[in-house]
Image (cartoon, coloured by chain):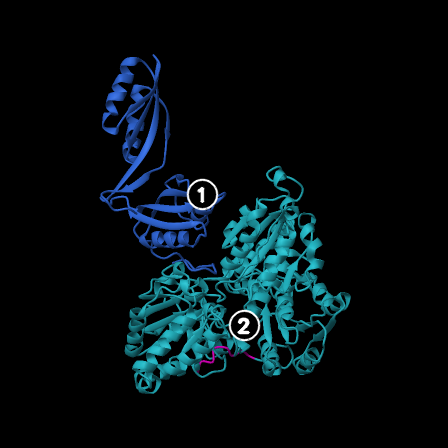
Chain colours: A cyan, B blue
């Protein structure tokens, strides 16, 4: 007679077989049998959060910085509903998460039992797939399938809902061998040699090419970023990146035009508008990128490399779709270039030299410039100083959502993938702090900084308590302007300066708050003291809340006004002073 | 153009709308229909009619037939999104005008009137394979199979024969000839 295991034991057996080291969770009635087993599985460590949304974002931070799936454990009812924001966030940004939720016993399902909710119904639109396990014999199969679905193809969140009686029932467990260890297996490659030849042909003919790369490169693994660098160097083409793609190409490289999109650089957006060949690698033509679709890059041939067939032609019609894993597509392109045109970058230089001259003209606009001040800390300056003082340290950056997020994206230069964790698709305020917790769990000896806004960070501030409990020395770098900055900016530019409810009249004293949580609070008020204070933060081996008091009126520029194409950006105040964009530019907003 | 106050772009031109029939083979498991239908409502696609039943009890496969309208891009997107669902095995689609495909809907008509009118009613259904399912001296139930627009027409025209109640299915589809989807 084989040994029988309870459902709760099987959950952990499955997690063991999936090489799970950390789970982020919060106990409750319907998951107590699972929590009861925790002590018997030493290889799995549980991180107790303070709110289930925090568990989800922490698991996201863990997954995005490590490349491994994040695991979340929550109870039924409110436990599951609290996790919904994080699941949706992971779905939008393609982060592999496995969420295990408890459910009321099967015989009570549908009776409005205590802490019952239709978890699979609620999470259906925000997961790749979900399961309600109604038979103990299915449990093992379902959990392993859940990991497979979360990590293969375009990654994403999944949820397994386990009723309490199933957690108690017993059955056999057969140990599981991972068949396909690769995250993005061959089964997702639908391209052939003809597609690659066609792309190389387009590359040879192009006079104004550009690479437009996104989070898909990061999701394809570190090797994909290496190959991308090789490809960009082998072609000599300019490259721009989406918010999620930052880090797959060095941010301080000459061929890199900076981020594109609504708050992207002038050169990146104009190059996207005027190019004759756009090679999209692992990006999805999001509306923050394209602006007005009808006038999006009107003169270009568009190539789209993506692992998800439904991303092709969803927002923008493309001329050459290549469906496959980014890493394998790029490797195939490089092989073909080496074979047919080993010296392509040099021989093609002439072909695209005019294009680079044009790009240099756009670059001279220095669209990320701002007017610095001696008396108040400009938020851009704060991010620049933070970058300069941390760039040698292999730093991991998370952010919340808003102006500070865009300034971080513009002024912090990344040179490695998986170092930048930000909520792009869903735009979840409160993402950065718990995400930093997850990143620090995955990389205990690395520097992890959440570049935050004071409004966002208050949404999940309770997770500081988690950081203190597990001695996770995360640094919360708050650009404090007392406003929901991005809301304030839109109100200034579009709603006649009617700052409706975007000012927080009563904020906590963040330094005292830090002390209350048992961590360290530091405040910087003037540009003169900023460097010293940042260094003090970096030298602190404990969690820190850094309250950086910045200019309250600063706006995030450049920007593409709503409903406008890429070549109609408005630039910052310095440019306005030079009368390059006058009243007319404002009217475009 | 009035000045936009939105952080989102304004809507672009819309493509030409066509009616398509989408056939989906799915695992017959709890919640699978909600996944398919939820995808339509969640992404703002239309469902004109829907027919679903298990077609293979051994493999547990159900066949879902959905009539929808959309531009060619939207139809492509619907198909690609459907293919991403875990319990979906296969997706096929064709235009309603497609001559190679047969579409049928079934309707049950209940007439409550006199025998003369009821006879006329059954006669009027003649082209649509009428089957008299139930008959009393003042009522009858007739089953017809026809195209959607034909049933629409009958529903209006049969008022005069004492049509009191209609129950109808969504369209089901099958290719002509030896081709199998």
List the residue tagged with mark 2: A418
List the residue tagged with mark 1: B28
List x then y, in percent, for residue A204. 29, 79
Q: Which residue occupies 57% across, 55% down?
A: A174
Start-end of magenta stretch: A364-371
List x then y, in percent, for residue B167. 38, 29
The answer to which quarter of the image holds residue B172 is top left
Question: Is residue A567 visible in this depiction of the protein?
Answer: no
Q: Nearer the viewer, residue A381 or A279?
A: A279
Residue sitting at the far front: A1
Q: Residues within 10 Å of mark 1 (few under 14, many from 20)?
A: many
Answer above or below: position of A260 versus B163. below
Residue sitting at the far top: B137
Let me know if residue B58 is in the magenta part: no
Apparent side of residue A581 relative to residue B109 in the rendered image (left or right): right
Chain letter of the residue beneath label 1 in the structure image: B
SS class, disc 2: loop
């Amino acid at each position: 007679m084989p040994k029988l295991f309870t459902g709760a034991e099987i959950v952990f057996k499955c997690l063991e077989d999936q090489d799970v080291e950390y789970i982020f969770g919060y106990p409750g009635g319907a998951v107590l049998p699972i929590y009861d087993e925790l002590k018997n599985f030493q290889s799995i460590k549980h991180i107790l959060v303070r709110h289930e949304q925090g568990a989800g974002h922490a698991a996201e931070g863990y997954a995005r910085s490590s490349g491994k799936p994040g695991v979340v454990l929550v109870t039924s009812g409110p436990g599951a509903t609290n996790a919904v924001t994080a699941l949706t966030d992971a779905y939008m940004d393609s982060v592999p998460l496995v969420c295990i939720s408890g459910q009321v016993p099967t015989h009570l399902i549908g009776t409005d039992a205590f802490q019952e909710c239709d978890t699979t119904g609620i999470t259906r639109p925000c997961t790749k797939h979900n399961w309600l396990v109604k038979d103990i014999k299915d449990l093992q199969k379902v959990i392993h399938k859940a990991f497979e679905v979360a990590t293969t193809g375009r990654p994403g969140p999944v949820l397994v809902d386990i009723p309490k009686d199933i957690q108690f029932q017993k059955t056999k467990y057969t140990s599981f061998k991972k068949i396909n260890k690769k995250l993005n297996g061959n089964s997702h490659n639908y391209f052939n040699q003809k597609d690659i030849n066609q792309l190389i042909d387009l590359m040879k003919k192009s006079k104004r090419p550009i690479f437009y790369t996104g989070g898909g490169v990061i999701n394809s693994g570190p090797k994909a970023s290496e190959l991308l660098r090789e490809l960009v160097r082998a072609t000599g083409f300019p490259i721009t990146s989406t918010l999620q793609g930052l880090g797959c190409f060095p941010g301080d490289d000459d061929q890199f035009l900076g981020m594109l999109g609504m708050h992207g650089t002038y050169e990146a957006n104009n190059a996207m508008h005027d190019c004759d060949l756009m090679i999209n690698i692992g990006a999805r033509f999001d509306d923050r990128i394209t602006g007005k679709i009808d006038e999006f890059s009107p003169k270009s041939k568009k190539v789209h490399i993506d692992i998800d067939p439904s991303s092709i032609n969803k927002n923008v019609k493309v001329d050459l779709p290549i469906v496959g894993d980014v890493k394998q597509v790029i490797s195939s392109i490089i092989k073909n270039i080496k074979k047919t045109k080993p010296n392509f970058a040099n021989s093609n230089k002439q072909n695209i030299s005019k294009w680079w001259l044009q790009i240099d003209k756009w670059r001279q606009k220095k669209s990320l410039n701002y007017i610095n001040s001696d008396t108040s800390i400009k938020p851009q300056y704060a991010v620049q100083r933070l970058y300069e003082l941390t760039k040698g340290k292999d730093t991991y950056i998370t952010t919340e959502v808003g102006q500070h997020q865009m300034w971080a994206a513009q002024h912090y230069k990344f040179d490695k993938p998986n170092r930048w964790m930000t909520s792009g698709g869903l735009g979840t305020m409160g993402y950065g702090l718990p995400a930093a917790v997850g990143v620090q769990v995955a990389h205990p000896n690395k520097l992890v900084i959440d570049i935050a806004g004071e409004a966002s960070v208050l949404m999940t501030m309770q997770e500081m308590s988690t950081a203190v409990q597990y001695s996770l020395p995360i640094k919360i770098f708050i650009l404090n302007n007392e406003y929901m900055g991005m809301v304030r900016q839109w109100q200034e530019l579009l709603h006649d300066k009617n700052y409706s409810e975007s000012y927080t009249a009563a904020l906590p004293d963040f330094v005292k708050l830090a002390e209350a949580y048992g961590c360290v609070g530091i405040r910087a008020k003037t540009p003169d003291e900023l460097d010293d204070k940042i260094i003090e933060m970096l030298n602190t081996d404990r969690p820190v809340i850094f309250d950086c008091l910045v200019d309250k009126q600063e706006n995030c520029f450049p920007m593409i006004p709503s409903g406008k194409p890429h070549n109609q950006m408005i630039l910052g105040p310095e440019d306005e002073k030079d009368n390059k964009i006058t009243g007319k530019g404002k009217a475009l907003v | 153009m009035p000045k936009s106050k939105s952080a989102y772009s304004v809507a672009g031109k819309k493509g030409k709308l066509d009616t398509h029939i989408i056939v989906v083979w799915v695992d017959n498991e709890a919640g699978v229909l909600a996944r398919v239908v939820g995808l339509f409502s969640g992404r703002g696609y239309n469902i004109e009619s829907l027919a679903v039943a298990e077609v293979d009890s051994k493999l547990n496969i159900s066949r879902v037939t959905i009539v929808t309208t959309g531009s060619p891009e939207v139809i492509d997107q619907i198909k690609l999104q459907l293919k991403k669902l875990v319990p979906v095995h296969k997706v096929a689609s064709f235009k309603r005008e497609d001559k190679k495909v047969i579409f049928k809907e079934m309707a049950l008509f209940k007439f409550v009137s006199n025998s003369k009118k009821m006879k006329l009613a059954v006669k009027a259904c003649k082209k649509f394979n009428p089957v008299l399912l139930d008959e009393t001296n003042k009522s009858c139930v007739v089953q017809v199979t026809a195209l959607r627009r034909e049933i629409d027409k009958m529903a209006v025209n049969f008022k005069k024969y004492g049509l009191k109640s209609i129950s109808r299915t969504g369209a089901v589809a099958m290719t002509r000839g030896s081709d199998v989807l």
